[in-house]
Amino acid sequence: MKTTLAVFSIGLILTMTACNQKAKSDSETTLPTTAFQEQFRPQYHFTPPAHWMNDPNGLVYNQGVYHLFYQYYPEDIVWGPMHWGHAVSKDLIHWEHKPIALYPDKNGYIFSGSAVVDKQNSSGFGTIENPPLVAIFTYHNDAKEKAGGNDFQTQGIAYSLDNGDTWTVYDKNPVIDNHEIRDFRDPKVFWHEESKQWILTLVAGDHARFYASNNLKDWKHLSDFGKDIGAHGGVWECPDLFKLKVEGTNEEKWVLFISINPGAPLGGSGTQYFVGNFDGKTFTTDQKDLKWIDYGTDNYAGVTFNNTPDGKRIFIGWMSNWLYAQKTPTEVWRSAMTLPRELSLAKVGSQYVLKSKAVEQLESLAVNHIEEASAKLPKTVDGEIVSQAEISFDAPNATLKLVFSNAENDSLQLSYDAKTKTFSIDRTSSGLVDFDENFSKEIHQIKVHNIQRAPLNFKIYTDQSSIEIFINDGIYAFTEIVFPKKPFNKLQIFGEENKEMKNFSVNKINTIW
Ligand code: FRU
């Protein structure tokens, strides 16, 4: 169902420049307004005011703000001709909604991509004093796709000289043309200091391709990666490539993200990663097994910010799954982003493993509610707080079960089986589940072999329609969406007899709206 929303003019007439496409109509320069209080509306996760959103795009920090662009269809709550929606934040937590940044043009819809601060003005779009923000994205040409060729996805660029408020599309687009590959998209660009050039990673169906450029306009194909490695149950999408230091050492490794749809461990969409080396031309890895950044069902197409002020590697993912994304039971907007997460790399035995945790800025929203150095099991937490909380504790390496519930008999159950090292999430009775058969077909079970440390630390974030679980400093992350008929207002934690939790705390997370 499509809901009519009150709209107000945000008083911002988008500046038209010579290269910009058609003038925008009135409705295109307005943003819908909402109190952000509808049923299921996340209270501290990013959502657009209204309509359809998928992947995060163009994550970049510039002049005091983090930019979040996103795949956006402003006419409906299902996927359609893609635009880049836009929001900015000073702290990654509170977001200000901005007008749409990029509109479909004669080259096609604006699919996923990235943004960089061109500090040296290598593109010539700005000046050294006012360096341009440059967006690099995929054009998807619907007419050409329908004509049946393989030439409908190309890469284009656009730039902004006012920190993202207005954009000019490059008049010589596309900058990477394509005539033979059906799925050829999602460019992620960064400045590679070692070889002093821009590196672009994109995906081409079943592999990633690397390109280099000195000016963001002329790109040279360097190498390919991945045809014979990793998961291939679906199309490769949304790559990212970056360097991380291995915790507690001076060793540096390169991490390559590849989203894949379908083909994730629990079905549908998921994001795998490879740890290896990148020498400015080629990415190589010794990794044999499959690794996933998140083992839940709802963290897809995630990528990281360029140019963060503190050098931290910050990630945001789309909190949904293409299996059922277009049918979830919201009416005004559809889909949310994951919490922004700080990534790090650890060595567990001989393996490199990615870790993630909610950014520390989130603590500014947290209000302490319960704090107990030790808490006997079973333990019950009652009240509204349960649906909007950070729950943290150290659990014995023993069987554990957490049940979130409400008076409607909805329940979401998390369990850890210490004997089989299996973590499971059961959302089969969690509220509205029958909008798509794939949503609650089975209990989600994940083997957690890398858990080598006891006690187990759990950090759990609940919002109105999501749960994010991090075990042992985020060596495992699980993200899932849920639609309880009423917000969960009871949490029971069960364990083995005589066992207790340590450092049990529950913080209420305040709303950002
Ligand atoms: C991933 C994706 C991208 C594409 C975009 C289109 O979810 O399929 O590969 O660029 O969404 O909206």
Image (cartoon, grey):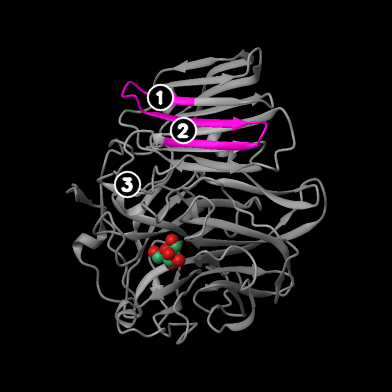
The magenta region covers 403-427
Q: Residue under circle 3?
A: 328
Determine whether 326 is above or below 362 in the image: below
Q: Residue at x 55, y 77 (%)?
A: 216
- Across and down, in percent, residue 151 comes to 41, 84
- Across and down, in percent, residue 491 comes to 47, 22
Q: Is residue 412 magenta?
A: yes
What amino acid is labelled 1 in the image?
Ser
Q: Indicate which disc, 3 or 1, sits on the residue closer to the N terminus.
A: 3
Residue 507 seen in render? yes
Front residue of 293 and 8: 293
Q: Which image quarter is the C terminus in?
A: top left
Q: Residue at x 65, y 68 (%)?
A: 229
Q: Residue under circle 1?
A: 405
Give the number of the mark in front: 2 or 1: 1
Between the residue at mark 2 and the residue at mark 1, the CA separation in whole angstroms equals 12 Å
Q: Residue at x 24, y 59 (%)?
A: 75
- Across and down, in percent, residue 401 comes to 55, 26
Q: Residue under circle 2?
A: 462
Q: Indicate which disc, 2 or 1, sits on the residue closer to the N terminus.
A: 1
> Tag 2's secondary structure?
strand
Between the residue at mark 3 and the residue at mark 1, the CA separation in whole angstroms equals 20 Å
User: In the image, is 276 to the left or to the right of 137?
Assistant: right
Determine whether 327 is above or below 200 in the image: above
Q: Main secondary structure of the magenta part?
A: strand
